[in-house]
Amino acid sequence: MSSDTGTSRPNPNEMTDFNIFTFNAKIFPATEPMVAKLGDRVRIRIASVAAMSHHPIHLHGYQFRVTETDGGQIPESAQQVETTVLTAIGQSRTFDFVADQPGDWPMHCHMTHHVMTQMGDKFPNTIGVQPGKLDEKIRASLLPGYMTMGTNGMGEMAEMHMKVPRNSLPMIGAPGPFDVIDMSGLLTLLKVREGITSYDDPGWYQHPPGTVATVAANDEMQRDGVKVGPPPSPNRKPDHHHG
Ligand SMILES: [Cu+2]
């Protein structure tokens, strides 16, 4: 099941091994955004040329109708309304919708490790471990650049630019409008804009005032009957004492 990093045979089950999934031979942020004018009728065709992987492709912001398979058009009465379309090995699926929601909408594979690419080599996978102060201790005494892949997953790796094996495509992520987008691989964006005159990348969507969630102030929380306590800390010791 496993294969060695640097060889040509990928093992997509292993996050630190060779792991490359692309849209049209590109990984995010190099994937070209799909630009639509508000009200355009959009048709997207996905074909999976993967040898060993299925791809459940999910589009944010829209419900679409799956209108075609490799076998031809699906009769309207049999078209399914979906938000994710599974494209199995060697299959194609076509879906249609009207671009009536302005914004930047991610389209990506729903397999978690398909929106990641390679992040390093030859280190053990400790996803889910609560590292506590382990990193600090190891960095101080043993390895200055050490980082445990703990409860927060591997997102920080996107900003670190670790050395990766030759003949591979490292995960780099990209700055987004709110934070670093620590994804790669099968991720691209549908950008729907009002009043555009070209389908060139229009940049990030400018959200109208009042449409982006913000942190609630204490008085707003109290107004809504939410008890305000101290912020949770992942390393906090239990409050009760034995004895
Ligand atoms: Cu996938």
Image (tube, rainbow, N blue to C red):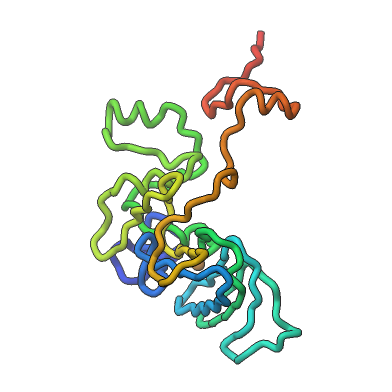
Position of residue 180 in the picture relative to residue 93 (left or right):
left
Give whichever of 133, 218 is nearer the camera: 218
Quadrant of the snapshot with the N terminus: bottom left
Hey, which residue is sitting farthest bottom in the picture?
A: 72
Q: Which residue is drawn at 51% across and 57% down?
A: 112
In percent of width and height, residue 41 lies at 58, 77
Measured along the vertical axis of the image, is residue 44 above or below residue 156? below
Q: Residue at x 37, y 46 (%)?
A: 157
Position of residue 235 in the picture relative to residue 117 (left or right):
right
Q: Which residue is drawn at 57% across and 37% down?
A: 214
Q: How many marks?
A: 0
Measured along the vertical axis of the image, is residue 77 above or below residue 111? below
Give whichever of 9, 114 is nearer the camera: 114
Q: Residue at x 40, y 29 (%)?
A: 134
Give the quadrant of residue 66. bottom right
In percent of width and height, residue 204 lies at 43, 55
Measured along the vertical axis of the image, is residue 60 above or below residue 241? below
Inspect this view and state whether residue 227 appears.
yes
In percent of width and height, residue 37 lies at 51, 70
Inspect this view and state whether residue 108 appears.
no
Give the quadrant of residue 16. bottom left
Quadrant of the snapshot with the C terminus: top right
Give whichever of 34, 55 is nearer the camera: 34
In percent of width and height, residue 92 lies at 54, 82
Give the quadrant of residue 220. top right
Position of residue 1 in the picture relative to residue 9 (left or right):
right
